[in-house]
Amino acid sequence: MTISLLQRLHVEHGAVAEFLALLDQEADAMAQGRFTDLPQLAQSKAQLADKIAIARRHRENEQMTLGFGLAWLLNQKFRGHATLTTIILLPMMLSPAVVGTFWTYFFQPQYGIFNYIVSVFSGTREFTMIGSTALAPWAIILVDSWMWTPYVMLLILAGLRSIPDYLYEAAEVDRASEWTKFWRITIPMLLPFLILALLFRFIENFKMFDLVNQLTSGGPGSVTELASITLKREAFEKWRTGYSAAFAIILFVSVYGLSNLLVRFLERVKER
């Protein structure tokens, strides 16, 4: 499982790097008036966008799985579930910049709590998360999942509590098993909420800036550099205003197009 996750991570970051390079070429073509190059670049960008979407869907599915499990647990309404819900939702209430700064201290090689815990169990003293090209993306995934899994949990929990009780009562009259009720009632009724959570997390992944900027600043090198960080550097550090404006428009169109596909799929699910 770890090997497959690493492979998906390398695929995603390789595709993102190629996608950013295509955005650079497309922005340059628009700035220089080479509009004949745009169709070919658009076709290559669409293929890479599909590749990135598949890779990110795997990462979002991990948050969806954790969120679904927590929502299923809290939906049982055991003693103290309200207090536990509040504790789980605390990370979501924090600012991404605050979370990034907070976890930066956790990941510090010299005095970080996270690195100390890893060194105690593994016996490795020279260990760093945000300073390693192989582990820095995992640090961002870990922090992002810690922060936004409660959000997914909240949406799914609302969906679980919106399912009418008479559906389960009718299934019990028909002597349906728990597994049958889960697949024939719970999952179909929750599907719009699951797609909605996937849509929101997909959009948030493209909007991500504060967390990564505070945690790694796009490093080491450009391993964790996102499109938003590239846009900030081009606009406010290199002052390439024309290029950054074209970059922002292309990024907006790309996110809008991919999000529109998910919204259409959500509408089809609702019509069933």
Image (spheres, rainbow, N blue to C red):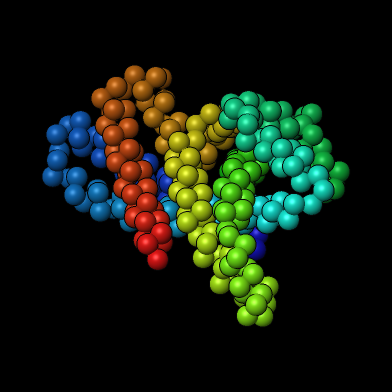
| Left or right position of 29 against 233 | left
Instruction: Name the residue rendered at 63%, 80% in the picture.
Output: 174
Find residue 99 and report its image quarter: top right
Horizontal and vertical percent position of residue 263 = 37, 51
The quarter of the picture where the N terminus appears is bottom right
* Residue at x 13%, y 45% (from the top left corner): 36
Q: In the displayed structure, would residue 266 be above or below residue 219? A: below
Labels in figure, total: 0
Q: Position of residue 63 (x, y in %)?
A: 60, 51
Q: Name the foreground residue: 134 vs 150.
A: 150
Where is the C terminus found, in terms of image quarters? bottom left
- Where does the image place residue 199, in percent across and percent down from the top left? 45, 48
**Apparent side of residue 110 relative to residue 165 in the rendered image (left or right):** right
Residue 256 shown left or right of residue 59 in the figure: left
81 or 244: nearer the eye?
A: 81
Q: Which residue: 33% across, 43% down?
A: 256
- Which residue lies at the image location 43% right of the left edge and 33% below the top edge? 228
Residue 142 visible in the current orientation: yes
Q: In the picture, residue 214 is in which quadrant?
A: top right
Q: Is residue 169 above or below residue 89?
A: below
Give the percent coordinates (x, y) of residue 222: 49, 37
Residue 56 in the figure: left or right of residue 253: right
The answer to whether any part of residue 24 appears in the image is no
State whether residue 90 is above or below residue 181.
above
